[in-house]
Image (cartoon, rainbow, N blue to C red):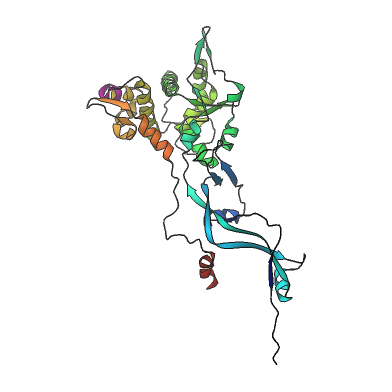
Amino acid sequence: MASQDNSGLAFTFAQKQQGFRLLELPPAILDIINSENPPILSLKSTATASANSHAVLCTPDRTFQLRQVHSSNSIFLIEPSAPGISLEDNAASGSTIQVTGSSKETLELIPTSPPTRFLLRSQLNVYHGPQEADDDFETMPSVSKTAQRSRMDIFANIPASANEIAQAWRELCAFESSDQSWLPSTSALSRIWRDLTECAALKGVQLGSNFHATDLWPLLEDCGYPHGFYEAILSRLDPNDHPSPHENRVIDRKKCVPWVGAVLLESCTENGDTTTKDFLKTWADQVPEEWRGDVSLDLIKGKYSQPTTSTIAFDHAAVKEEESKGSANAQAKGAPRSRKWHEKFRPASKK
């Protein structure tokens, strides 16, 4: 009678199971991890829990939202029953393999463009400009210790990459003074720009050409502005999207004219709309003489409304909606992603 081969691999479950989640890494993250000098990746989430709270994985310049996906197949974490023996030797000897953990959920990373300007606004105290006090200027208002937050602390608690937050910080002209972060109000922005252009005219400085930042700073300091605010304006209007601090500065014409128009419109229509004709004239008066011809409503499209054919107002609702929506579903288009692991590995097994 033929003998029956009873050799096989025993498959058992450990009494104490380990909890785990399998994180699926997209090619963009894999390339970073496998690079010669991989950067630090960080996990972040919103500071307060809410229905819209979520965790994100951040590279230095990109943000990926973590999403848990249920799988129809179980994923097992296994190890040899005898310590020090490889899985191959374990199988060859007919020994037992233990399942020490299992999961039906995986985590995937979805590329996203978070609404960094919207998130940043909520973290900053508002700076309204120098305040007159006792025939002098009080440079910075006082805030309670609980409201004092440094730039580093704010960056660490916004669920977005450092570069994305830095861009929003620059666009908002946010600045730090004495370890306290500030968001200038529209009136403060309008005021410092007016004073900056007046100081430039007094000093004979052409803003569209290279000039030394120190040429204008003493005059603006006398007006009561903090140095960080002055640097924030220069950085916002620099031709380089990632400017580094340096003495030689230049105001970019293509950035400056639309920015001045938006700031001026919001400032002059805080208490109601104004005539379009008067606004355009004031706007042209607020930019260097050779740039006056650039002034056009097309440059601030999406930021204004016209209650009547002859009046204009800043469109707060449209701007807020644009800032807050972000791009939460920025996953690349393509074929539907399979959540069945045998289908995922099938193409690789055929190579």
For the N terminus, the quadrant is: bottom right
What is the chief secondary structure element of the magenta stretch? helix
Residue at 49% across, 33% down: 170
Residue 151 seen in the current view: yes
Farthest front residue in view: 1
Q: Is residue 160 above or below residue 253?
A: below
Q: Position of residue 92 (x, y in %)?
A: 71, 76
Q: Position of residue 125 (x, y in %)?
A: 52, 25
Residue 287 in sight in this render: no
| Residue 60: in magenta span | no
Q: Is residue 182 or residue 329 the one in the foreground?
A: 329
Q: In the image, is 170 to the left or to the right of 311? A: right
Residue 218 rendering spot, x and y as whole percentages: 52, 19
Compared to residue 22, the image places residue 164 above or below, namely above
User: Considering only vertical position in the picture, is 80 above or below 192?
Assistant: below
Q: Give whichever of 90, 274 is nearer the camera.
A: 90
Outermost bottom residue: 1
Residue 305, position as x, y percentages in the image: 30, 30
> Residue 278: within the magenta?
yes
- Front residue of 259/30: it is 30
Q: Quadrant of residue 273?
A: top left
Q: Which residues are magenta?
A: 274-279
In the rendered image, the residue lying farthest to the left is 309
How many circles with numbers are drawn on the protein? 0
Residue 328 occupies which quadrant of the picture?
top left
Q: Residue at x 28, y 26 (%)?
A: 312
Depicted 118 relative to depicted 1: above or below: above
